[in-house]
Amino acid sequence: MKITEFFKEEPSYIIEIPLGRVLFRTLNCEEYFKFQKVLKLHPKFKWDIEDEIWEECVLQHSLPTSRNNLPAGVVTTVARLCLYYSYPTDINGANFLLDRKREDLKEIKEQAILMVCKAFPTYVPEQLEKMNWETLTKRLAQSEALLETEFQFNSQTSQAQDDSGKIFKNLEEYVETAIDFNQINRTLHEEEYGQPVGDFNLKNLRG
C-alpha cells in the first residue's frame, strides 16, 4: 500500500525510536472514551489495552520484530502518544487545537469549500475535499450564481503549512522526557520477578 494511503482518513503521526519508525493513527472519540473507561475502571488491564491500541492504531512500522518481541516500553510509548494526540487533556489543549483549525480556514481550499457548502447544503466538506481544484472552482462559480454574490478570496489567505518537522520534534521530546526504556525494563522486571541480579536486557514482558 502507498504511504499516502495511510494519511487519508485519520490524523496520523510518526515516531522514530532507535529500533525504527512507527506510523500510527489517532483514535476517534468513541474509541478514545471506550479505552479510557476500561483504563479507569480496570487499571490492571492497562497492558492489554495498550496492546489493543497498538493493534488498532499502528498503520505501519519498520521495527525489526513483532509486537510481542519488542523491548518493554515501546508499545507503552506508542499507546500513550496515541491517547495523548486523540483528545485534549484540558480546556487549554482544546482551545489551542480550535485556534489551529481556525487558522486552517484561511487556506484557499477551505474558503472555497465553505462557500460551496453554503450554496449546496447537501455537500459536506469531506466530499468537496476529494474534488480536483478545477471542479471545485466550477462549484464555487456556481455558488456565486446561486447566492447572487461575488466571491473573493480573503487577502489573508495562507497556503497549507508543513509542520511535520515540528510534530516530529515534539514527539522526540515527548519520548525523551517521558519514556526511559531502561527504567521501564527494570521496573517491569522488579514487578514480575523482584530485584534483578547482574546485567539484563529484557524483551517485552507483556507478550
Image (cartoon, rainbow, N blue to C red):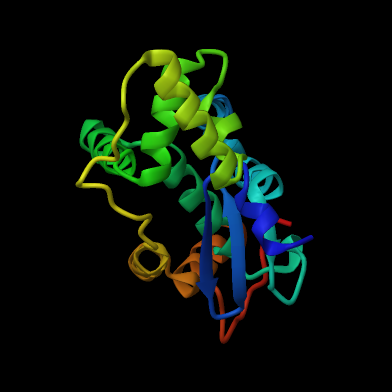
Q: Judge by depth and name the residue closer to the eye, 104 or 31.
A: 104
Against 190, is 158 above or below? Answer: above
**Which image quarter: residue 70?**
bottom right
Against 173, is 28 above or below? Answer: above
Q: Judge by depth and name the residue closer to the eye, 77 or 16.
A: 16
Q: Judge by depth and name the residue closer to the eye, 103 or 130.
A: 130
Which residue occupies 40% across, 28% down? 114
- Residue 87: where, in percent of width, then height? 41, 36
> Hey, which residue is sitting farthest bottom in the picture?
199
Q: Judge by depth and name the residue closer to the eye, 132 or 39.
A: 132
Which residue occupies 27% across, 47% down? 157
Quadrant (top left, top right, bottom left, bottom right) of the C terminus: bottom right
**Which image quarter: residue 2?**
bottom right
- Residue 145: where, in percent of width, then height? 43, 19
Residue 74 can be seen, yes or no: yes
- Residue 35: where, in percent of width, then height? 56, 31
Q: Is residue 116 shown left or right of residue 1?
A: left
Which residue occupies 51% across, 58% down? 77
Quadrant (top left, top right, bottom left, bottom right) of the N terminus: bottom right
Q: Is residue 148 shown left or right of residue 129?
A: left
Residue 40 can be seen, yes or no: no
Against 155, is 173 above or below? Answer: below
- Residue 112: where, in percent of width, then height? 41, 35
Which residue occupies 56% across, 86% down? 198
Question: In this figure, what is the number of numbered marks?
Answer: 0
